[in-house]
Image (tube, rainbow, N blue to C red):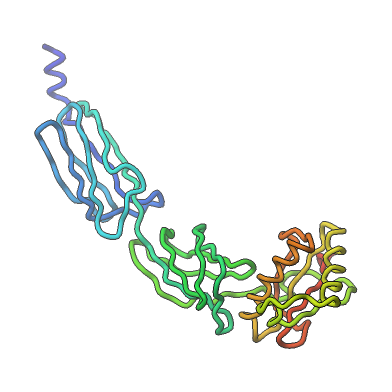
Amino acid sequence: MLLAVLLALLPAPIVEGTVGEPSGLGAGGAQVTLTQGERTQVLRTGPGGEFRFRVFAGPGSISVVLPRGWSHDGPATAGFEARSGKVVRTVFAARARRVLHGRLVIEGGAIGEVDVDAGGVRTHTDAQGAFIVEGLPSGRVRLRMEWLSASVQMPAGPGEVTADIPLTAPRLPDLRRRALPEPPAVRPVAAWIEGRPLTDAESGDIERLAALANLDPAFRLVMVAPAGSVAPAARAALVFERYLSGPFLVPVEKIAFAVGEVAPPGHLALLLMRPEAQ
């Protein structure tokens, strides 16, 4: 009898929680339904994705219907056991749908048919450099295409962004390396893009530098594009890299790309370089 009286004096149980992203962004306006037997309560989450119910002691369940632009990142329902005087807290993981319709450009030229990493999400551009990617986080998202990089600002909540995204390439001095006294291997950009076979002289020059690059862990092979035609040079460098890491057996991590005045216009040059301090 005394126990029953004490239980009756305890505050009613509370069931509360949030709906939203782990970063803290809440899904405001989500419909949350709480059911205990034949009793049902329905409410909408607040701006921060929060909800709070006063319930009876005993078991129950909660289900969530997300607002437009959100998707579940875990279960949409959860069970609970409410006890007098206690607070039950439940978190429903959800993700805002952020879509980027982008086009990669550099110095006004598009970078087509390449793989892109956008905030950890992989995608591929079409021939005009265009791509679509979703599942991105909010805020500044970094994009990388091999040796080129860029960034784009994504909204805090659900939304779509359409933009040309200007890539930047490192300048040769930015690498903080100095060239070794070895003649560079030089080849027209068009020859790489069009897939022309290497001449004996071109193959010999590349093979010489590749062999030297593998002699010292500090050595790097740097493909140098002329300023003013970085877009086609970057496409040519993607082909060149496959040759270097394939037939010429150079590890990918020893290959770099930069912009500088090393070769004649319309050509891609290959330099053997080492850190400035050495």
Give the quadrant of the C terminus: bottom right
Q: Is residue 272 left or right of residue 15?
A: right
Dividing the picture into quadrants, the one containing residue 257 is bottom right
92, 200: nearer the viewer: 200
| Residue drawn at (68%, 76%) of the image | 195
Q: Is residue 219 left or right of residue 240?
A: right
184 lies above or below 17: below
Q: Residue furthest front?
A: 197
Spot occupied by residue 273 in the image (x, y as percentages of width and height): 82, 68
Q: Is residue 4 left or right of residue 24?
A: left
Dividing the picture into quadrants, the one containing residue 110 is bottom right
Q: Residue furthest top?
A: 1
Spot occupied by residue 197 in the image (x, y as percentages of width and height): 75, 76
Q: Residue furthest right?
A: 181
Spot occupied by residue 254 in the image (x, y as percentages of width and height): 75, 61
| Residue drawn at (47%, 78%) of the image | 164
189, 36: nearer the viewer: 189
| Residue drawn at (82%, 72%) of the image | 203
Dividing the picture into quadrants, the one containing residue 17 is top left
Give the quadrant of the N terminus: top left
253, 67: nearer the viewer: 253
Q: Is residue 273 left or right of residue 27?
A: right
Spot occupied by residue 117 in the image (x, y as percentages of width and height): 54, 62
156 lies above or below 269: above
122 lies above or below 197: above
86 lies above or below 141: above
